[in-house]
Amino acid sequence: MNVENTQELYLLVMNAPVGICVLDAQTLVAEIVNDSFIEVAGKPREAILGKFYWDTFAEVSPYYQSVLETVISKGKPYSINEAELSLIRHGKAETVYVTFVYAPLKDNTGEVKKVAVWVMDNTLQVLQRHKVEESEKFARTVFYNSPVAKLVYTGPEMVLVQANEKMLEIFGKGDSIIGKPIMEAVPEMQQTHLFAAYQHVLTTGEIHSQKAARIMFVKNGSPYYGYYDYTYKPLHDPKGRIHGVICTAIDVTQQVKANKSLEEAEQNMRGAVELAQLGTWTIDVATNGLTYSDRLIEWFGYDPSAQNYSEVIPILLEEDRQRVADAVAWGLNPESGGLYDEIYTVIHPITGKKRILHAQGKTVFDPEGKPVRMNGTAQDITIQIELQTQLENQVQQRTEETAAVIEELRATNEELEQTNVQLIHSNEELEEFAYIASHDLQEPLRKISTFVQLLEGKIREHLDEKSAGYVDKIKDATSRMSKLIRDVLAYSAVPKDDRALVAVNLEHTAKNALEDYDLVMERTGAKVTWNTLPVIQGIPLQMSQLFFNLIGNALKFRRPDVPPRINIHCSIASPEEIRSAHLKEAMSYYKIQFTDNGIGMKPEDTQKIFSIFKRLHGKNEFAGTGIGLAMCKKIVQNHNGEIDASESSENGAVFKVYLPAKN
């Protein structure tokens, strides 16, 4: 090779776009280094040219020094594609990806004289490919782990290419259906519109969406109808042609069923309101606008819509106006709990007829606590109020007459005096009974009870706040009225009939009463003890009611987390006890004392508890109507005895029952 050719070859190597470094095979000293090699190495020329190769690239010598020695000794080239190397480039450690070749250069005898190192930097391409791969991996992860059902169909036969677990769950199939035409894999879909929708997207490229589509699938061998929101989006190949669709689907079956139930519940609620003869109204706080139902429009004599609710106040009886206005204002205050409950009289502007209404409302507040609207109901209680007034007048008249009789007969014997006391008690109870009857024995009770039973199992979890409020009010009122009526009837059904007196073994009576409370006693850990109880002359049913109520009272008013302990002790009443109980001193009496460790009562309340409908606690603390102890008193007095709780305290109740003993 002449000098000119050698010079051209040198220039070709130096200007090659591939990094080239020529090493002496014996010394591994770099004899030729082109610019491309220097760029890949990231080291200055003087650090490479004329230097021992592994001194320059000490960071990779542990991995490739033996490889280079093998190339020289065996005369065979070595190449590696996109090798990951940690190089010191420009004074910093960098990770690079390079393709390089160790090529042996031999003389005419076949001896390796030189080694050419060919190198190409692939770092940019490798990193870009890694990003693409990571992106694709991320996309697959999102696809398969999405909480939304997803799938991919391709081809004219609608082949299922991909489907995540949510979509397979909707199909009710395993992943064995992937790769098959969906109409074959899930044959029930042939009866749907889905294939036509797919073909439409393939043909037009338009996105197809449908809300709450009713679709039948076969799951566990049985047909299942569900409702789904789904979307078909066209899928394009690299040339931009549509070759399939990407589908997303959301199972909205429960929402659709809930909406249908809610619609049915609202319809039933409107029927309940109509059946209960209630009027409904709403105050819009932002506009002060008032909306009335047709029944209220009839009662008020005009439609107040588009008017400020305060303009309705003049229609009310003058003495009610300020009270009602103040009550509405307070009900719109968050501190009130949003409750409104008033009774007032309205005057019809045309007929002048007065109507007494009982209105109840509940305010809806926004998240910031500001009132949005007040929703409520109203009931015409004119007849009940008139009846109450008549009954109160009659009770007052009878009380006055009774007082006159008592005054005239004050000087009679002890038995007559006791009868007069009982008569006063009866009149007081009659007055209380008349008051309760006029307030709580509402005419629509039977109809409301029937309708609540039909609604209760269906609507609770699907109602909005307004509708739920209506149901709660109807159900609560019906339950309390029904309980009250039963207890009042039970109380009034306790007769005094001396002819019904028979021998009653109170030992048996106590045991029978405990059998009725066995589950409560097991649940609370309660224990009841007594000494020997006597046989008396009495009415068996009333004695059972007496023991049942007194034991039940002790079990109900127990202390939290304290097992109830009830002791029944019988003894012969002393003369002093007989006098204190205002009993006949010529007779002997058993004193049967019921003592418990419950919450007891304050000393000032021991006389109040035997009054009918008297409660020491709210209905939210302890259920009941306040008739149980009144019934006990009536039963004991029917047997010519007495009952008191004067020794009770807040450490427990003590009830002393005095019953006549055999003389």
Image (spheres, helix red, strand yellow):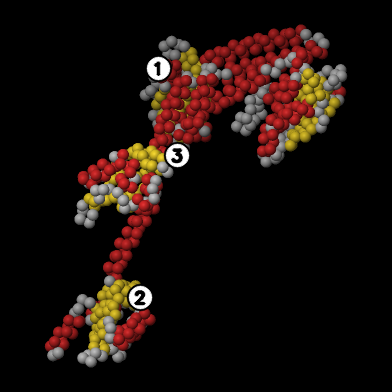
Q: Relative to 97, is 563 above or below?
A: above
Residue 643 location, x and y as percent?
A: 76, 24
Residue 329 location, x and y as percent?
A: 48, 28
For the point 34% across and 81% down, the residue is 64
What SS does tag 2 mark? strand
Q: Please indicate, yes or no, whether residue 74 appears anywhere in the rendered image.
A: yes
Pointer 2 and pointer 3: residues touching (CB < 8 Å)?
no
How dense is the environment of label 1, judged by Cα within 10 Å: few (below 14), some, or many (20 and up)? some
Left or right of 218, for residue 272 = right
Q: Earlier in the sequence, mark 3 or mark 1?
A: 1
Give me the C-alpha separation between circle 1 and circle 2. Answer: 91 Å
Disc number at residue 86? 2
**In front of the other: label 1 or label 2?**
2
Judging by the rendered image, the residue that carries numbered circle 3 is: 367
Left or right of 114, for residue 215 = right
Q: Relative to 576, is 522 above or below?
A: below
Q: Say what amino acid the circle numbered 3 marks.
A: Pro
Q: Say what amino acid the circle numbered 1 marks.
A: Tyr
Residue 13 location, x and y as percent?
A: 20, 82
For the point 34% across and 77% down, the residue is 88
Q: Dividing the picture into quarters, in which one does residue 238 lie? A: bottom left
